[in-house]
Amino acid sequence: TNGNRKSTQRNYKKDSSKGKTVQTRRREQSHLLLVGDPGCGKSQVLRFAAALCPRSVLTSGSGTTSAGLTCAAVRDDTSKDWTLEAGALVLADRGVCAIDEFSCIAGKDRTVIHEAMEQQTLSVAKAGIVCKLNCRATVIAVCNAKGGYYNPDKSFSINVGIEPPLLSRFDLIFKLIDGSDAIKDDNVA
């Protein structure tokens, strides 16, 4: 393999309606979501995955803002100039961004993740600074089912509490369900 390989593969397709060649991109990073009941070890798997990768950022969804995930505009005290301070997704470029308690991220803050997961970039327009930042990171997110335990009578989207457009950005989704069996539970206890 070539060490200078780019993070996206480029494909060329013929647009039948206009007769033009259209360039498309396919991202190489896969995104993973672990959903399940409390106590199934999701956070431990997340921490282990972050420890395996030499370039990783581990963050928690509770209390995370869009600036913490993307970037923040910070004013320098001495020069009074604005600079951008990288957030978790940008710091994890070409690595892993591990997000615990993903469903705790506020809905308005969750929308900034869409572009990062699909396009692998972040379009920024803050404090007069307009740019595109690379965030070619694999996102591994974990969350508990909404309301505590996974309810098989409800749809997956309702159980998770994450909107379908954001769910569609995940390539692999695993449900970790702690099935209750009184006999097995007594034997373990």
Image (cartoon, rainbow, N blue to C red):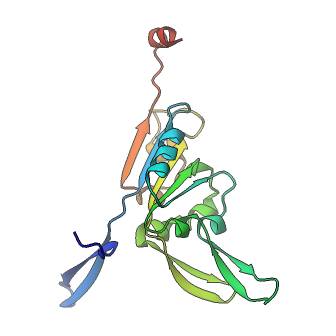
Residue 158 visible? The answer is: no
Instruction: Residue at 36%, 50% (x, y): give it.
Output: 172
Q: Quadrant of the N terminus?
A: bottom left
- Location of residue 86 (image quadrant): bottom right
Depicted 21 relative to depicted 54: above or below: below
Left or right: where does residue 46 sit relative to residue 80? left
> Is any atom of residue 128 visible in this view?
yes
Q: Quadrant of the C terminus?
A: top right
Q: Residue 53 placed where, x, y %?
A: 44, 55
- Relative vertical location of residue 3 with respect to residue 148 in this rendering, above or below: below
Residue 3 against residue 61 in the figure, above or below: below
- Image coordinates for residue 182, horizontal then vertical, percent: 49, 11
Please name the residue shown 73% across and 78% down the image.
Answer: 74
Residue 107, by quadrant, is bottom right
Residue visible at 55% across and 40% down in the picture: 144
Report the number of numbered marks: 0
Q: Is residue 57 above or below residue 161?
A: below
